[in-house]
Amino acid sequence: METSLLCGDELGYLRYASSTNAYASVLHRFGSESNKKDLSVLKLCSSFNRQMECNLYALARKKGSIEIVRAGGGGFFSNVFEYHQKTKAPSSSSNPCVGLDFAEDGTQITATDDEGTVTVLRVKQDSNGTWKTDGVGATVFQLKDVREGGVLCARASKDGTRLLYGGKGQGNDVKMVDIEHEGKLVWKAKPPPVNWLNYRAPPWVKCARFKERGEANGGNASCVFAVGTGEKKVRLYDTRVNKRATMEMEYGEAAVNSVTFSSVDEHRMFAADSRGKCCAIDLRTSKVCGAIRGNSGSVREIEAHPTLDLVATVGLDRYVRVYNGSNRKCLGAAYAKQNLTCVAWDAFEEDRNRNRKTKKKNRNNDDDDDDNDDDDDDNDDDHVGNLPKKRKKKTKKSKSFEEDDNDDDTSLVIKKKKKKKKKNEDVIVNYVDFDSDYEEEE
């Protein structure tokens, strides 16, 4: 099955990569402004819109605009809607967007800036669920409990009802508000206990991520979430149990930049820091269960595929890499020539339904094969029981000859095992240049 992804860089380019040609790319950039720094892509997310019957991307630029892009065939894109936030002129230190999330149905976008201003874009019912300039309503509200240091990260739940945010400094620990009631405080985390020196470090929330619906969270999309801190720690919270973290572990030697949950295994998550360390974490044992190797430099974002066992990473080494989530082997890599900031998977609704159908078919086929094998075994036993048994002739062999035979058998088994190991270790990694002939034609 074909898989593809989209990543943004600091110059404002959107780069499309597909598995059909080893994650090759087609470049496209929106806008014609001369200042390229204002066009840099800060956040990127994707969702499937049922009314438009296509996958939509939402991206936030440093100039303060939120653009909604429709994915087309072959990696070409067309702009659907553009909304300019009412913010101040962007400076070198300001961050006009620290959080951008699509709702599950693709009809709502929640954006948050570093000053605590939340912008919610919703499709009006009169516009038949399509993102048109006249058919989109925007509501803006201010987060009340934001202190010095501002907001460093913000994430909205898939159902679009809860907003999770945090920052740096006293009073800026993890909090959760209700989006429908315009920022009403719903949940607030308690600080961790003091250490052996009777010292409690101030909170420093760098990244956060909600866990998707599953058996672990009882089908609720806004009760279990993970947080990565600038103090080299990864925490897991459950709002149903306690206001303190249910899991806390030391991670690496630098600040944690991104965390994500696996869509295949509910007990596994991934984290990446600013030194290029990417690891898989087992939530049952609270320990690292494997490392994702190959990244050099800070990893800006790590993203898991919504249906498949794949993980993508982008960072300052200018490579986009795709890994297998279970064995953590690199399946493909491409060079982008620019510092990458964010990545999003292109997962269509049709692909999700197709995966579910194929899984059910495979299960049914396996059950039928097992039943047929059992019937064949029973028939074979009946036929064997009717045949007369033959006596085997005993042959005398010397002990030395028997030992030689055993040695030959063991050597054959060892050779077979070595061949199997070599087959598993041979992994082809394709390094592809993103700047294709598409730029020259333009």
Image: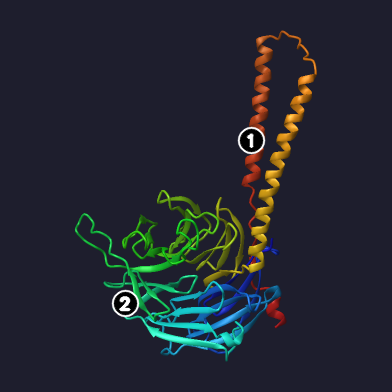
Mark 2 lies on a secondary structure that is loop
Q: Is residue 86 above or below residue 73?
A: below
Q: Quadrant of residue 208?
A: bottom left
Rendered image quadrant of residue 46: bottom right
The mark nearer the N terminus, 2 or 1, is: 2
Residue at image mark 1: 417
Residue 383 to residue 228: above or below: above
Which residue is at the front of the view, 86 or 396? 86
Q: Amino acid at mark 1?
A: Lys
Q: Mark 2 against mark 1, which lies toward the viewer?
A: 2
Q: Quadrant of the N terminus?
A: bottom right
Name the residue rendered at 56%, 76% in the picture. Answer: 106
Q: Amino acid at mark 2?
A: Gly
Q: Report helix, strand or loop for mark 1.
A: helix
Viewer-proximal residue, 226 or 41? Answer: 226
Q: Quadrant of the C terminus?
A: bottom right
Q: Is residue 337 visible?
A: no
Residue at mark 2: 149
Residue located 71% across and 74% down the image: 73
Instruction: Tell me where residue 172 appears, x and y as whole percent.
Output: 31, 72
- Return the residue found at the far bottom: 134
Q: Position of residue 204 (x, y in %)?
A: 33, 68
* CA gap, disc 2 and disc 1: 58 Å
